[in-house]
Image (cartoon, grey):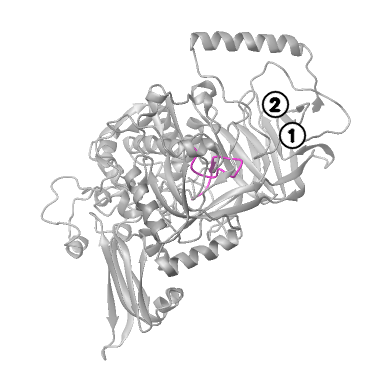
Amino acid sequence: MTAWRCDSTVSPPVRHAVLLLIASVLLSACAAPKPAPDGPRSPGAEPRVSLPTEDPTSVAGEEGSRPAPTAERDGTEPSAPGRPSSQQPGSGPASPGDGLAESPGPGPSDSGLASPDGSGNAEGLAGSPGSGTGKAAEGTSATGAPPGTAASAQAAQPPEDPLAQGIPTPGDLKRLDFRGGEPRVPVRLMEGRREVTFSPRGRMRLRFGGPDDKVLDAAAGTRWTVRVTQGTPAVLSARVQLAEFRITDRAGMQAALEAWREKGLAVRTQVLGTVYGIAGKVIDNRRTLLLVDEVLTPEAAGRRQAELLRSHGAQTTLFEEVRTPASAILEVRDESGAVVGLAQDRLDAETPDGAGFDVRQVEYGVGYDFHGFEDRTFRGALQLVVDRAGLLAVVNVVPLEDLLKGLVPAEIFARAHPEALKAQAVTARGEVLAKVGIKHLADPYLLCSEQHCAVYRGRTGEAASTTAAVEATRGEGLFNEEGRLVDSVYSAVCGGHTEDNDVVWGGPPDPSLRGRPDVIGPVGGHRLPASLERWLTASHLPAACRLSSFAQPSKFRWERRFTAEQVDARLKRLGVGHVQALALTDRGVSGRASVLTVSGDKGATQVRGELNIRRLFGMLNSSMAVVEAERDAEGRLTGWLFRGGGWGHGVGMCQTGAIGRAEAGQRYQDILRHYFNGAEVAPIY
């Protein structure tokens, strides 16, 4: 049964006085960080109203589950044709994203490893292609100020020691709500929808917002449909992003700035990311972007990228900004189809008892061959908001630990050794926190639930074994010697040797992300990359990812053949004509190549970037490969053979290797210490 409700037991003046008193006590005692304030109803716009007939007011004195405000920047990699994007396919560096999993339900088979899409910060061992994130191409300053403001300019020159300057507490963050001691994360379940149907699993409170904050109370099991009407898309502008530097790499940033200015290009810097403290630990994922100081439409910016590639050989990305937010009227209908209320841009649904929601026909695998729809169940609260296309997005606002319960089993085999599952839980927790202020900042959510960020199926995808691993490591993350959170990336199969971060994504070296042999026992006489062919053909190599009971020989070592015609077609846009020679060079410590030189009958060129090389050939398993021409008896070129090792970018933790190490008796702390160069597990909250 549905009922409108007005709670008048606490008058506004009394409620206001009580809240002031509580705030005063908390501030004086420093007992806890204050909750993040309620966010705007949509990026950059206060909601406007509302409901027909009755005039209920919000219920006082009960804690809601609204997330903190969102910013109006974004840096994403395309997840589907036709979706708004700030990063062109194959352009610029991307974070890790190929991995393992055997999550139940729709998706690839239980063979485990996802297709190697290097587009994410977690090449998860997932039941769908490589979960992870692409490096952001745009964002706000550490202060949350828009580019070009005084606050943004000041943030571009960060202090050497943020702690000495008084870094913000979790309560000051605009993207995460730390109510209850752990962050609540807004995760997009799907977007681009015209209508969505959902049911609460317990008593529901649906907030319409507006000046009166109108509320609808409903019983468990009732069915509700939200439709979007009168939608208008956001208006975007864009700048071309030339480079990205760690916040501490001032020398590198300054050198690049001067180099581009000498070429006659007007450039500027932009700080992306945030820095904050939790329980004495520093969470700092800031970086400085180097941008062309020319504001364009996204279409014109794409043409500018092509010009810079032709004239300077520069691989670039796009930095987009929302000039005018999207807007729409959201129409709420009950089971009979009757309209019971209207809201501007956003609706908030919560179950005060924490029962969560069933969401019908959740779209997944957008842009992949396993694309489909599935009814799913989620913990936490829901937001139904207008996306940048002026359509409907469904966002799950969920505590981080509950998020991990639905995420970890999609990143690694749930049947794996418990110590490997714990290692995955710790890395995934750090990875989520490392994305704060980096991704989807123009969107009304922090993360997405697909390969671009990390595969998440909610309660539907949970498994008892991975839930136990999350609970056993509650609040733990990886920290380096300076006490900074490690960017705990991972890939499915390293092939026996991990790789340096700067080889794969460029930028300065990260001391925690140094490539090293991943063998159990002595390495032997195989030295990389000089003897890569010998390494690839070595038999009985004691690599952790080969010895694991979950190892797949076709992922540890592999071959891919292409006909000459296929290669000519794939490389046609390079303009070199019929391809006559291919060479993989500029290899890292694992033998992974970062440059492909292509020669044809009309010229020669180079393709730079590990991910760009892999994409040219339909996502090679990795760039730890050698390539050779194949010819017929008359010596005519017939095709090309790639022979390689590993599946994914190879930076950070090797997921299959972690399982092998766990099976060899290593604890999760030791596993992580190995893959992240001595980093230590410590509590975040």
Q: State which tag comes first along the sequence, 1 or 2.
A: 2
**Can residue 619 be seen here?**
no
Q: Seen in the image, is 461 located left or right of residue 362? A: left
Was residue 448 drawn as part of the magenta stretch in this picture? yes
Determine whether label 1 and label 2 are within 8 Å by CB.
Answer: no
Residue 529 screen position, x and y as percent? 20, 59
Q: What residue type is labelled 1?
A: Thr
The amino acid beneath tag 2 is Arg
Please state the extent of the stretch shown in magenta in the rendering: 436-451
Residue sitting farthest toward the left = 525
In the foreground, 50 or 401:
50
Q: Which residue is drawn at 49% across and 32% down?
A: 400
Residue 111 shows up from this direction: yes
Q: In this view, does 487 lie above or below 551?
A: above
What x and y, as percent, mark residue 80?
Answer: 56, 57
What secondary structure prevails in the magenta region? loop
Residue 680 image position (x, y, % from top left): 29, 31
Q: Mark on residue 159?
A: none
The label shown at residue 222 is 1
Q: Which of 364 and 85 is in front in this view?
A: 85
- Residue positioned most to the right: 53
Q: Which residue is found at the position 37% from the left and 75% from the top? A: 562
Dot 1: element? loop
- Establish if 342 lies above or below 582: above
Badge 2 marks a residue whose secondary structure is: loop
Spatial distance from mark 1 to mark 2, Cα to Cα? 9 Å
Characterize the local packing of mark 1: few (<14), some (14-19) or many (20 or more) Cα atoms within 10 angstroms.
some
The residue carrying mark 2 is 203
Above or below, 449 relative to 169: below
Q: In which quarter of the image is residue 417?
A: top left
